[in-house]
Image: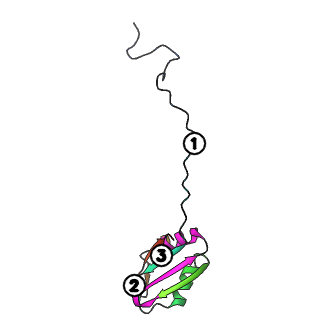
Amino acid sequence: MHGRGRGVAGQMGRGRLMPNKQNLRVVECKPQPCVVSVEGLSSSTTDVQLKNLLMSVGPIQSLQMLPQQRKAIAKFKEPAHALAFQQKFHRHMIDLSHINVALIVE
């Protein structure tokens, strides 16, 4: 008498054949955001200060300050720089204000 649950040698795993999907990958090509929104700026934060902060991560294309809303919109040349800025400076304190950095998909 053989042990319980044992099949014939060489047939282990049979009946559960799965198609080989090793080389199949679904890749979505979403547009990467290059634009960041910086909110919660102090009224004393200047565009020069913010520009220096932005350029510490990478080159920017444009910077639009909205002092009435205590906000700025900046566009980086590369999506990776926008992401790096968001990760590095979200909830960062500048001029005694915590800024919120969000990525904007155009």
As helix, strand or loop, the secondary structure at mark 3 comes to helix
Circle 2 residues within 10 Å: few <14, some 14–19, many ≥20? some
**Who's the residue at 40% across and 87% down the image?**
69
As helix, strand or loop, the secondary structure at mark 2 comes to strand
Q: Position of residue 43 (x, y in %)?
A: 41, 92
What's the distance in space between the residues labelled 3 and 2, CA to CA?
12 Å
Look at the image and tell me in which quarter the N terminus lies.
top left
- The residue labelled by disc 3 is 89
- The residue labelled by disc 2 is 97
- What's the amino acid at mark 3? Phe
Circle 1 residues within 10 Å: few <14, some 14–19, many ≥20? few
Question: In this view of the protein, which residue sits in the foreground, 28 or 90?
Answer: 28
Label 1 vs label 2, nearer the camera: 1
Mark sitting earlier along the chain (1/2): 1
What's the distance in space between the residues labelled 1 and 3, CA to CA?
37 Å
Q: Is residue 75 magenta?
A: yes
Label 1 vs label 3, nearer the camera: 1
The magenta segment is: 66-86
Number of the label disc, if any, that sits on residue 79: none
- What's the amino acid at mark 2? Ser
What's the distance in space between the residues labelled 1 and 2, CA to CA?
48 Å
- The residue labelled by disc 1 is 24
Does residue 79 appear left or right of residue 12 in this picture?
Answer: right
